[in-house]
Image: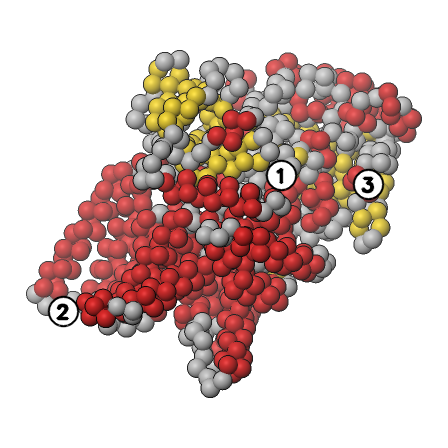
């Protein structure tokens, strides 16, 4: 038994090691590893057959399993990477034929869906066997969207791009998620060219995609029965695992109360369905003596429960929690039927081996670790969800309540540190919220939602209970102390924290459990120097120019203060750069509050994410050129409007020895607000570090916003009349004005600022043509190194890294590179990046 346990642990370790590699070894190494593993298995088999007593046998078994896991995962990774879309085929019109996979997710007039590619061509030329086998498409259309169904085969004119790696610290890694799904390209259906054409629609129940069509049919029925789209979206998530229609406000509520697991198809839901089916099947089986004589009831109950749970898991989308639950139920059922009671570690590890054998990249999913750690903790602690045996119904009820509270306490202790490591957020009220949510969702809402597939009226009853429950959870989530954020921890400390949380719930004396407390306290009081980007020393500053797409957002930190300059764009009704990029970056870097939020002007690509930032991060002062009526100015903080200071040239302040100076707009510009464009009122700020050591340039950054030709001239005129002259504008780094538009970055302005490094914050494949070729030529003519965020990702720079005063001249073909700082996207992390 110990040998099997060690071997399975070695398999999981081999898969985990392979997924951490920044570059992928060659196929030859993978084949060699698999061959070596097979040879070791043969040697071990011969040793067992001839009863050789080799003391190193467990070591040989572990090495063989680890090699096989590493080699097979590497081999499969090569096959997936070979499906990458050729660079010459990106951003051009292609003709794609393919079958719709999964459930199309519709939001307004836009729908997103996965496609199994059958044919891909460019101007009649067919892409060969190396084409992506699966892509994700987004379609902006009208009535045709209602006709997109799972299993259909369509022909579209599309534009595809390879998934880009994560561009900022913190936040969601879409590239890793898409790679795990097998999606090797994303794109959009083009309105130009040939009209999309439906080639084939499955017309019988057992054709390809039958399960997905059934799921889509159930989702449509829920929407017809429940008119409230918000409640219908949650019910669809509970019934068929479709979470695409759950609104962002509801996700925020569930996240802050740590109840997100109750609205997804978790292991608890799968096990409950399997248990109900096994109970019903056993009751029916006992009605027939002939059936009981041929097949015992316990066998029917065990096998039937597993089969029904597996069928429901397929209907629910076959996610990692569902896979884990079905695997564990199957292993447990087989052991019970065989009469071999195994201890919990091999059962737990066996399900992990099956899941990682089916999908090794599941190890990169948060759901894998949350579900497996929770089940492992409950199994190791001896907890049981079985109803206690008691003499009366009241005693049984009391025992059930005690068991539920004890189970919730164990899972809270074990999962809270893990959630802090993965999501950088801890729900303070999670224990209390789950004591309410788990019984209500498990006993009432989920059974009613599943029963609605047979009797649709039950969905209305479930919606009524769900509405009340969400209101209670929203009330709890609105408490100011409901949740707190945790910075990204160093890898070693992250592992130590997870192990420490496990020790707190093991069935051992408390004096041994308390050994895990120091690691948990280190997570709470993490030294600032241990964070992903430590704060600068007094007199210096750090800056992060974020990759927010077509927009601007820059974080500037001093030793004890933080400022965000603009918050990027808003994308549709459900997403904005503040929620998607800025807040996760602030959390990852350990920034718990903003001393100043600067909004340069009211254009959507600069203010679009501000509401999310204000909602998630305490802001001491809003500094902007926004008009009094702007919604952001009316945002309440502790019952009062957000404190505001109008942005005017000449304003100065100092934080930790670092000087901040506003250089635009002037007071007279506000008097002409009605006749000026929003860009003309854009705030521009220069940040200056303390005087540098002899021989080094004094570090500074110029945050130009969207000022244009006339505003640049105004800035120069005011600087010439000031005490410092044009030298007061000279800056080490320049965040390029107006994203490199041809209406900005004049020669005179660039000569006065004289930057060593230019950062162009633009969207990939933006429709404005930014940056303008003539502007780029201007920077190159002045020997300015430049990078754009699509290629660079977040630009990170510490002012203490300022170069010597006389930088070397860059070669003509080397202008588009870094002279200072580092690019987040250009740091290799995983081979699929």
**Residue 17 image position (x, y, % from top left):** 37, 51
**Residue 689 image position (x, y, % from top left):** 74, 40
Mark 1 = which residue? 575
Q: CA distance from mark 1 to mark 3?
A: 21 Å
Q: Secondary structure at mark 3?
A: helix
Residue at left 14%, top 55%?
Answer: 42
State whether residue 751 appears in this view. Answer: no
Q: Secondary structure at mark 2?
A: loop
Query: Which is nearer the eye, 439 or 31?
Result: 439
Q: How is the image coloured?
A: secondary structure
Q: Which class describes the residues within 10 Å of circle 3: few (<14), some (14-19), or many (20+)?
A: some
Mark 2 = which residue? 53
Q: CA distance from mark 1 to mark 2?
A: 63 Å
Nearer to us: label 1 or label 2: 1
Please report contact status of discs 1 and 3: CB closer than 8 Å, yes or no: no
Q: Of all residues shown, which one is farthest toward the bottom?
A: 391
Image position of 738 with respect to 327: above or below: above
């Amino acid at each position: 038994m110990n040998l099997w346990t060690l071997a399975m642990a070695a398999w999981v370790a081999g898969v985990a090691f392979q997924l951490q590699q920044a570059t992928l070894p060659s196929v030859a190494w993978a084949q060699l590893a698999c061959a070596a593993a097979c040879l070791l298995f043969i040697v071990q088999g011969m040793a067992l057959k001839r009863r050789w007593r080799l003391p190193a046998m467990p070591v040989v078994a572990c090495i063989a399993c680890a090699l096989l896991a590493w080699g097979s995962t590497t081999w499969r990774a090569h096959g997936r990477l070979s499906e990458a879309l050729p660079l010459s085929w990106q951003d051009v019109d292609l003709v794609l034929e393919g079958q719709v996979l999964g459930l199309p997710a519709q939001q307004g007039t836009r729908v997103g869906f996965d496609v199994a590619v059958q044919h891909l061509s460019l101007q009649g030329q067919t892409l060969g066997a190396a084409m992506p086998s699966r892509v994700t498409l987004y379609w902006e259309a009208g009535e045709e969207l209602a006709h997109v169904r799972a299993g259909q085969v369509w022909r579209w004119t599309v534009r595809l791009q390879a998934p880009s790696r994560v561009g900022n610290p913190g936040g969601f890694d879409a590239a890793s998620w898409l790679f795990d799904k097998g999606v090797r390209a994303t794109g959009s259906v083009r309105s130009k060219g040939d009209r999309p054409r439906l080639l084939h629609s499955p017309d019988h129940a057992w054709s390809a995609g039958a399960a997905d069509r059934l799921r889509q049919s159930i989702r449509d029925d829920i929407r017809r029965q429940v008119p409230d789209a918000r409640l219908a979206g949650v019910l669809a998530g509970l019934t068929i695992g479709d979470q695409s229609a759950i609104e962002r406000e509801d996700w925020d509520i569930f996240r802050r109360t740590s109840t997100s697991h109750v609205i997804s198809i978790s292991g608890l839901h799968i096990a409950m369905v399997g248990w109900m089916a096994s109970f019903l099947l056993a009751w029916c089986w006992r009605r027939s003596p002939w059936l009981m004589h041929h097949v015992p009831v316990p066998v029917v109950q065990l096998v039937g429960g597993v089969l029904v749970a597996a069928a429901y898991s397929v209907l629910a989308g076959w996610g990692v929690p569902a896979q884990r639950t079905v695997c564990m139920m199957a292993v447990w059922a087989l052991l019970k039927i065989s009469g071999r009671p195994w201890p919990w570690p091999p059962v737990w590890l066996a399900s992990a081996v099956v899941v990682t054998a089916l999908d090794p990249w599941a190890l990169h999913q948060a759901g894998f670790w949350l579900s497996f750690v929770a089940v492992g903790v409950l199994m190791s602690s001896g907890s049981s969800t079985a109803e206690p045996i008691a003499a009366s119904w009241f005693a049984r009820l009391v025992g059930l309540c005690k068991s539920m509270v004890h189970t919730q306490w164990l899972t809270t202790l074990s999962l809270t540190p893990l959630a802090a490591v993965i999501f950088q957020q801890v729900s303070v009220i999670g224990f209390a919220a789950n004591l309410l949510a788990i019984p209500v969702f498990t006993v009432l809402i989920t059974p009613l939602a599943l029963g609605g597939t047979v009797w649709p009226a039950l969905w209305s009853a479930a919606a009524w209970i769900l509405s009340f429950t969400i209101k209670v959870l929203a009330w709890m989530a609105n408490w100011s102390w409901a949740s707190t954020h945790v910075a990204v921890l160093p890898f070693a400390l992250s592992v130590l924290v997870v192990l420490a949380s496990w020790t707190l719930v093991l069935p051992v004396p408390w004096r041994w459990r308390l050994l895990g407390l120091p690691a948990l306290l280190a997570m709470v009081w993490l030294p600032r120097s241990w964070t992903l980007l430590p704060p600068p020393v007094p007199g210096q500053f750090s800056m992060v120019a974020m990759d927010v797409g077509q927009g601007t957002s820059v974080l500037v930190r001093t030793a004890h203060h933080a400022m965000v300059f603009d918050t990027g764009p808003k994308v549709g009704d459900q997403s904005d750069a503040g929620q998607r990029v800025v807040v996760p970056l602030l959390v990852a870097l350990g920034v718990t509050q903003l001393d100043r939020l600067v909004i340069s002007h009211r254009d959507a690509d600069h203010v679009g994410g501000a509401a999310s930032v204000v909602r998630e991060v305490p802001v001491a002062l809003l500094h902007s050129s926004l008009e009094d009526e702007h919604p952001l100015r009316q945002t309440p903080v502790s019952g009062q409007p957000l404190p505001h200071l109008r942005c005017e040239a000449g304003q100065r302040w100092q934080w930790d020895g670092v000087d901040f100076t506003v250089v635009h707009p002037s007071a007279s510009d506000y008097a002409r607000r009605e006749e000026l464009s929003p860009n003309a009122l854009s705030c521009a700020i220069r940040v200056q570090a303390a005087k540098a050591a002899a021989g080094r340039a004094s570090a500074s950054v110029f945050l130009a916003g969207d000022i244009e030709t006339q505003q640049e001239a105004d800035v120069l005129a005011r600087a010439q009349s000031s005490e410092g002259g044009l030298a007061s504008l000279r800056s080490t780094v320049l965040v390029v004005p107006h994203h490199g538009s041809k209406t900005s970055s004049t020669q005179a302005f660039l000569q006065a600022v004289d930057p060593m490094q230019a950062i162009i914050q633009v969207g990939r494949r933006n429709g404005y043509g930014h940056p303008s070729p003539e502007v780029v030529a201007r920077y190159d003519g002045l020997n300015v190194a430049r990078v754009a965020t699509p290629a660079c990702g977040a630009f990170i720079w510490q002012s203490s890294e300022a170069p010597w005063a006389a930088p070397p001249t860059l070669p003509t073909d080397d202008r588009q590179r870094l002279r200072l700082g580092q690019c987040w996207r250009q740091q290799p992390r995983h081979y699929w990046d």
